[in-house]
Amino acid sequence: MIAEDERIVKSRHRVKTYGEVFTPRRMVEQMLDLVRTELETGPHFVDKTFFEPAAGDGNFLVAILLRKLKAIEKRYQASRWPSESLFALASIYAVEFLHDNHEAAKGNVLDVFLAFHRSHGVSCGARTNLRRAAEHLVSTNILHGNTLTGLDPEGRALEFSWWIRSSDESTTVRRTPFTLASLRGGGFDFTVYESYAPCRIDHVHKEVRADG
């Protein structure tokens, strides 16, 4: 049974026009149970990537992040929670077609991240590196656009980034951009990307170019 406060349809117009129907939380959890090893217990679970091609308001993204955060809390010392939680954020990708859903998805994911740290007394105010890095990862990984065309509302190619950890225990990451379209077909990718220098995961918002 679906909880009374859980909406799976916002309006008939949105269903008819966009085919928008939200997945119930119970079903989300059942589906994620199928990949529990990748999410919570397997080797390098923090860095295992997940992509949601139609994010809606972020119900899958939130559930994925919550599971990763709970696993981080169990498996790592508290001193590593800030950096590992940022790597968890960096592993979650999504595209959403509707503007209001896109904004909601980003906000919901960020709220879960900040609530986790606040519950443990970690400072995450607007000017902290932790929050600014989290905001940057969310805005870079959760994009507004059309998964089918690979384009944003302005007709530009949707561009994601791999956030590559330098080693298993490291807090250093290298950003490597790629287009969503480049994942299809296995053809040559002639896109000219920005090049970024390695940096600490909590400094990704500083956008240091490799040739800067």
Image (cartoon, rainbow, N blue to C red):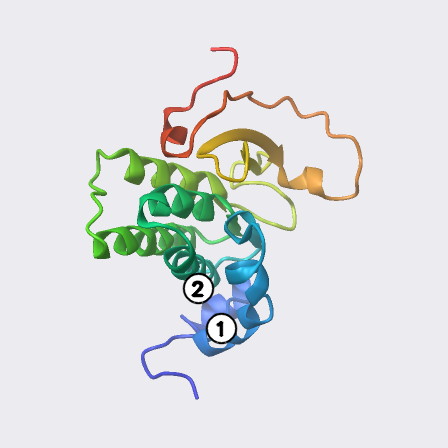
Query: Which residue sits at x=74%, y=44%?
Result: 184
Question: Of callouts 1 and 2, which one flags the residue occurring earlier in the amino acid sequence?
Answer: 1
For mark 2, give the secondary structure.
helix
105 or 85: nearer the eye? 85
Height in image: 116 above or below 26? above
Relative vertical location of residue 175 with respect to residue 69 in this rendering, above or below: above
Looking at the image, the residue that sits furthest to the bottom is 1
**In the foreground, 192 or 197:** 197
* Number of residues whose C-alpha sits closer than 10 Å to that of mark 2, classed few (under 14), some (14–19) or many (20 or more): some
Q: Amino acid at mark 2?
A: Ala
Question: As drawn, which residue projects farthest toward the front?
Answer: 77
State the image coordinates of residue 166 (x, y, percent, origin top left): 54, 31
Residue labelled with disc 2: 63
Residue under the point 58% across and 63% down: 37
Taking 168 as reference, is 43 above or below it? below
Q: How many marks?
A: 2
Report helix, strand or loop for mark 1.
helix
Kindly identify the amino acid type of the residue bearing the numbered disc 1. Answer: Glu
Residue receiving disc 1: 29
8 or 34, nearer to the observer: 34
Cα gap from disc 1 to disc 2, whole angstroms: 7 Å
Q: Is residue 144 left or right of 205 when viewed as pictured? A: right
**Residue 174 coordinates in the image, percent (x, y):** 53, 29
Tag 1 and tag 2, C-beta contact below 8 Å: yes
| Circle on res. 147 | none
